[in-house]
Amino acid sequence: MNSLLRQLRAAPNLLTLLRLLAVPFLVEAILAQHEEIALLIFVVAGATDAVDGRLARRLNQTTRLGQYLDPIADKLMLSTLFLTVTWVGLVPKYVTVLVFARDIGILCISILLFFSGTMRDFRPSAIGKLNTLVQIFTMLLVLLTAVKTTATLSELRHWLLVGIAWLAPLSAAQYAWMVFHRIATDPLESLA
């Protein structure tokens, strides 16, 4: 228990917790049509995400809790944001469905691998990282165009949404292929 409290008090983990706490305020701002506030919350949350990992390394405060908490905060922020902006009509439903289908597929694969003890190293792929980066920039642009729209920003937002519609299933397929290929080629290594 003492170790958990010490990990919670680490500055990077406090930033991550701040990001988690920002999620309901972000949702409320979007639902109340306070787009400027929503954009500000998202930018500040993004800044904490950019800082917490560097801070953990610089202060030598990398913790096991932070290794789990950081990706959970990121995924919760993005997933909730996708649902909310889709609800208010800023993003087409099919894009959010593809994003969630990918995430649920990867979650199912991860759970299966975890409980089977088959593969412990399940890092993001290059396409998966690109997909997440495009999702972040798209959400930033969606919120920005909700505040002030121009033809150029609207066009860019459209193409980023198309990019997500392609990258989400491609990324899910790549994860599945990597896992099945690795298990098929070296089943003994995947058990390590």
Image (tube, rainbow, N blue to C red):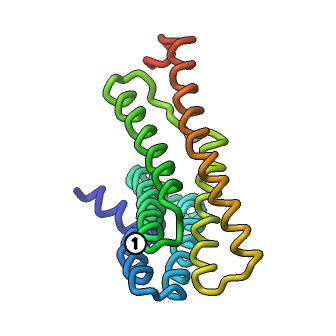
Q: Whole-percent x and y of residue 129?
A: 62, 48
> Quick one: 116 or 136, which is closer to the camera?
136
Q: Residue at x 47, y 88 (%)?
A: 34
> Quick one: 89 or 120, which is closer to the camera?
89
Tell me: residue 93, above or below residue 179: below
Q: Residue at x 36, y 60 (%)?
A: 7
> Quick one: 77 or 51, which is closer to the camera?
77
Q: Whole-percent x and y of residue 96?
A: 48, 56
Q: Residue at x 57, y 26 (%)?
A: 178
Q: Whole-percent x and y of residue 43?
A: 57, 77
In what element is the residue under mark 1? Answer: helix
Spot the residue most to the right: 152
Residue type at the position of mark 1: Val
**The C terminus lies in which quarter of the figure?**
top left
Q: Residue at x 73, y 69 (%)?
A: 155
Q: Quadrant of residue 119?
A: top left
Q: Whole-percent x and y of residue 32?
A: 39, 86
Residue where numbered disc 1 is placed: 23
**The N terminus lies in which quarter of the figure?**
bottom left
> Quick one: 94 or 83, which is closer to the camera?
94
Q: How many marks?
A: 1
Report whether residue 13 is seen: no
Report whether residue 125 is seen: yes
- Crowding near the residue tagged with mark 1, few <14, some 14–19, many ≥20 C-alpha atoms within 10 Å: many
Tell me: residue 73, above or below residue 184: below
Tell me: residue 102, above or below residue 21: above
